[in-house]
Amino acid sequence: MNMIITKWIEPYVLLETLKKNCELLKDFTFDGFSKNNVKKEFLKQLTKENCFGLYMKNVNKFYIFKGQINIEEIFSFIPEDYEITMDMDKPFNLIDMGKAEASFINI
């Protein structure tokens, strides 16, 4: 399951809050040329147990965290602030098109 955040949130606040509640295992930096290969490696790493990923708008990184987290509770999101999807492409596409602020992958 993936969660797409459509409500604006400061990327730094999002990242630092997650770091306080979960363990940051790895981040993957990419550019326009390396994005697809880095994304494949990122998705491969997400198969580990109890891990989830984060992809944010205007940040050329993918993040992998370990732990359990209640996103709605920690950030006080209401159902109108996010979308849940099983589609693995949609979270990335909406971020890349600027229609979402962040996506949690495999949460």
Image (tube, rainbow, N blue to C red):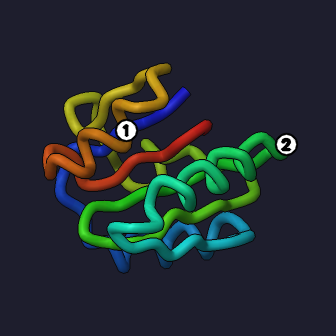
Up-down: is 35 above or below 7?
A: below
> Taking 63 as reference, is 77 above or below it?
above
Q: Can you give x and y, in whole percent of width and height, for residue 72 in the image?
A: 43, 42
In this picture, residue 53 sits left or right of residue 98: right
Q: Which residue is mark 1?
A: 91
Amino acid type at circle 1 is Pro
Q: What's the residue at 50%, 71% (across, down)?
A: 17
Name the residue located 35 percent from the left edge and 39 percent from the top edge. Answer: 4
Residue 39 percent location from the top left of the image? 53, 53
Residue type pointed to by label 2? Glu
- The part of the image, by quadrant, that contains residue 26 is bottom right
Instruction: State whether residue 86 is above or below residue 99.
Output: above
Does 83 sit left or right of 30 as displayed?
A: left
Q: Quadrant of residue 75?
A: bottom left
Quadrant position of residue 107: top right
- Which element carries disc 2, helix, strand or loop? loop
Label 2: how many residues lie within 10 Å, few (<14), some (14-19) or many (20+)? few
CB of mark 1 within 8 Å of CB of mark 2? Answer: no
- Of 59 and 102, nearer the camera is 59
| Disc sitting over residue 49 in the figure | 2
Q: Quadrant of the N terminus?
A: top right
Residue drawn at (46%, 72%), measured in percent from left and top?
30
Q: Position of residue 61 (x, y in %)?
A: 46, 70
